[in-house]
Image: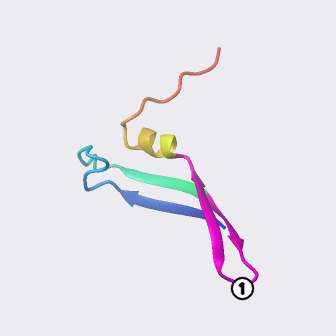
Amino acid sequence: MEWKASGTNTGSLAGIPATNRSVVVEGCDVGEDGDDGLIRRETDYWNEASMMRQLGLVPEPSAAV
């Protein structure tokens, strides 16, 4: 399943004070169902570095030359 989430950082995040900046993050969940129809495994993929850049906590990558 592909997803998109958005929000505003108004509270601490992993001990880092709130930035009050808005973010939009996209990701994908990949799961495996068993023969009984229950979820056996799920893995989430998303770009945490993109979120950290949007929050101003990580610098933008430098342009390739």
User: As displayed, is residue 31 above or below residue 16?
Assistant: below
Q: SS of the residue at dot 1?
A: loop
Q: Residue at x 53, y 27 (%)?
A: 61
Does residue 37 lie above or below 40 as drawn? Answer: below
Q: Which residues are magenta?
A: 28-47
* Residue found at the very far top of the displayed protein: 65
> Residue 33: where, in percent of width, then height?
71, 75
Q: Residue 11's quadrant in the figure?
A: bottom left
- Is 10 magenta? The answer is no
- Of all residues shown, which one is farthest toward the bottom? 36
Type of amino acid under label 1? Asp
Q: Could you tell whether 17 is left or right of 4 in the image?
A: left
User: What x and y, as percent, mark residue 7?
Assistant: 40, 60
- Total numbered circles: 1
Task: Give coordinates of residue 54: x percent, y percent.
Answer: 43, 43
Residue shown at the point (31%, 47%) measured from the top left: 14
Q: Residue at x 26, y 56 (%)?
A: 10
Q: Is residue 38 magenta?
A: yes
- Residue visible at 59% across and 21% down? 63
Image quadrant in which the N terminus is located: bottom right
Residue under circle 1?
36
Q: As displayed, is residue 60 above or below residue 34?
A: above
On screen, residue 17 versus residue 47, left or right, reads left
Q: In the shown orientation, is residue 10 left or right of residue 61?
A: left
**Quadrant of residue 59 within the rendered picture:** top left
Colouring scheme, one of rainbow, by chain, secondary structure, one colour: rainbow
Residue 49: percent from left, percent from top:
49, 40
Q: Is residue 62 left or right of residue 22?
A: right
